[in-house]
Image (cartoon, rainbow, N blue to C red):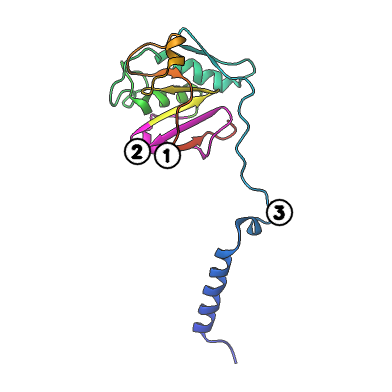
Amino acid sequence: MAPSPRTLLVAACALCALACLLPAAALAGGSGGASYQEPPKPTKKARIVHGIAVAPKGAPKRIKAVIAAANQIVRKPYRYGGGHQSFKDAGYDCSGAVSYALHGGKFVASPLDSSSYMSWGLARAGRWITVYSNPGHAYMIVAGLRFDTGYRDSYGKKHGAAPGSGPRWGKARPTKGFTARHPAKF
């Protein structure tokens, strides 16, 4: 006698429930149980000279292009919505500044807002670039330096970062409350 459709449904549900209880490594056939590991950080970090970031020797061309683009707007003022109608603007908000810099390295084709950066690229920190975002703010770490429109630090001031708000370079800041995303291979 063949099993009833209800019996088959119950069996299928039981198998699905069991599969959900298995660890992810057991399901990742051929992975040998490997799990995600943070990518290695750059061996050399960028530095700030007179408020401008200098890329480390050996940095990939696209990373150097991101740093060069960010340097073009590093003394611009903060302007809510700045950099979103067009990459070229008189002032930049947080995500507009990040978009401008990433566009320089050909990582984005059009400006994104901070919420959009929460799902951009790949999850976790990258080796050369990490964009940190939440619904209200975005900034990025490039070759070990923070490019941000807000959070100021004594390191940036000591190395010539312009006072006031707007895109500036500095050291890393706390990341609690932010998602970390990065472009593939970087």
Q: Is residue 123 left or right of residue 148?
A: right
Structural distance between the alpha carbons of marks 2 and 1: 8 Å
Circle 2 SS class: loop
The residue at which mark 3 appears reads as 30
Q: Is residue 111 magenta?
A: yes
Image coordinates for residue 103, horizontal then vertical, percent: 45, 24
Residue flagged by tag 3: what amino acid is it? Answer: Gly
Q: Earlier in the sequence, mark 2 or mark 1?
A: 1
Q: Nearer the viewer, mark 2 or mark 3?
A: 2
Q: Is residue 11 above or below residue 149?
A: below
Q: Secondary structure at mark 3?
A: loop
Residue name at image x 55 percent, y 22 percent: 63
Mark 3 or mark 2, which is nearer the start of the sequence?
3
Vertical placement of 88 versus 13: above or below? above
Distance of mark 2 from mark 3, alpha carbons? 38 Å
Q: Which residue is mark 2?
A: 135
Residue type at mark 2? Pro
Separation (CA) of disc 3 from disc 1: 30 Å
Could you classify mark 3 by the number of other residues whose Cα lies within 10 Å: few (under 14), some (14-19), or many (20 or more)? few
Task: Give the quadrant of residue 79.
Answer: top left
First to last magenta residue range: 108-137
Mark 2 Cα within 10 Å, few/some/many (few <14, many 20+)? some
Residue under the image location 63 percent in, 59 percent down? 27
Question: Circle 1 is placed at which residue position?
Answer: 118
**Looking at the image, do the residues carrying marks 2 and 1 touch, with CB atoms under 8 Å apart?**
yes
Q: Residue at 64% across / 23% down in the picture? A: 43
Say if the magenta span includes residue 96: no
On the rendered image, what quadrant is the N terminus found in? Answer: bottom right
* Residue at the image position 41 percent from the left and 35 percent from the top: 133
| Disc 1 element | loop
Picture coordinates of residue 166 (x, y %)? 34, 18
